[in-house]
Image (cartoon, rainbow, N blue to C red):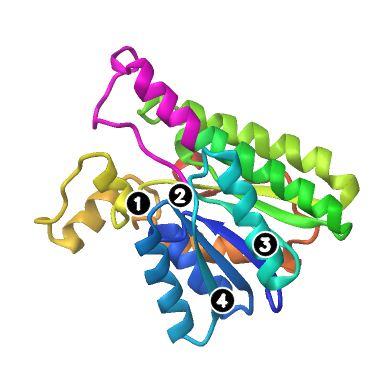
Amino acid sequence: MLEGRSAVIAGGGAGVGRASCLRFSEEGARVVCADIDPDRAEETVGLVEAAGGVAVPVRCDVSNEADVEATIATAVERFGRLDIMYNNVGVPTPRPGLKFEEHTVEDFDRLVAINYRGVFLGSKHAIIQFKRQGRGGVILNTGSVAGLVAWGGSVYGSTKGGVHQLTRAAAIEGAPFGIRCNAICPAGMPFTQFMAAMGVDNSGVDPDVLGQQTGAMHPLGRPITAEDCAEAAVYLCSDRAANVTGVLLPIDGGYVAR
């Protein structure tokens, strides 16, 4: 579905980003795997290449405009153009169970800089490149169920709500230029580094038990996986979704439909 496309996947070193690098490559895309941790980016590229795909690693701090510009430039230099920009970097609420009023200004600034400014910068410079090329393009953002409903992590959810509104605005402004913009909105994902980043140590928990506990939050009874998100990402970035833009797609086992 993505044969010959040039894609930048931010946060490609782990979790949803890594799964998406692999799936995009399987579908024929050439991938720039961007991550703030260059070793993780290299590991993902190794997995892509072992599967017969084409990928290059780039160190990128999505909150840094120069890094974002350089990452997109790498896609253009290596693959001739940019077709897809997947803004997939995010950090969680810094401490589990943190109440709104317990957030420090430093907590707020970090969440906004990475979760919101990172998507703004990725979208901004993708649009500039798409317009320069004159052939349209696709932006995909990783939002969250926490940006659709109040689900704890108030400031984190607020940054994702900002991502959702930015997605819709970019979709409308980009439409006359053939630029589509959508977002996926995952629910509970116990098997990614996102939980560890929150300070939750699941290392001693049986994976089946952990999956059942998280899945119990969702009407379908299953936890959300990185692969679930990657499959949705492939569809939204492909021509099969050529008439789909401005969509916030829950990957949530029915959570927000209740």
The crowding category of the residue bearing disc 3, from other C-alpha atoms within 10 Å (few below 14, some 14 to 19, many at least 20), is: many
Among numbered discs 4 and 3, the one appearing first in the sequence:
4
* Residue name at image x 74 percent, y 39 percent: 170
Answer above or below: position of 32 versus 110: below
Q: Which amino acid does label 3 sit on?
A: Cys
Do tag 4 and tag 3 residues touch (Cβ < 8 Å)? no
Q: Nearer the viewer, mark 4 or mark 1?
A: 4
User: Label 3's element?
Assistant: helix
**Which residue is tagged 4?**
25
Magenta region: 89-114
Q: Name the residue under label 2.
A: 252
Kindly state the secondary structure of the residue where label 4 is placed. Answer: helix
Q: Which numbered circle lies on residue 237? A: 3
Front disc: 4 or 2: 4
Name the front one of labels 3 and 2.
3
Q: Report whether 207 appears left or right of 216.
A: left
What separation in Å lies between label 4 and label 2 (alpha carbons)?
Answer: 25 Å
Q: Marks 4 and 1, how far apart in space?
A: 23 Å
Three-letter amino acid code at disc 1? Met
Comes first in the chain, label 4 or label 1: 4
Image position of 77 with respect to 223: above or below = below
Name the residue beneath numbered marker 1: 189
Q: Please state the horizontal and vertical placement of residue 92, each as a whole percent of the image.
A: 36, 37
Q: Quadrant of residue 155?
A: top left
- The 10 Å Cα crowd at callout 4, few under 14, some 14 to 19, many 20 or more, is many
Mark nearer the N terminus (1 vs 3): 1
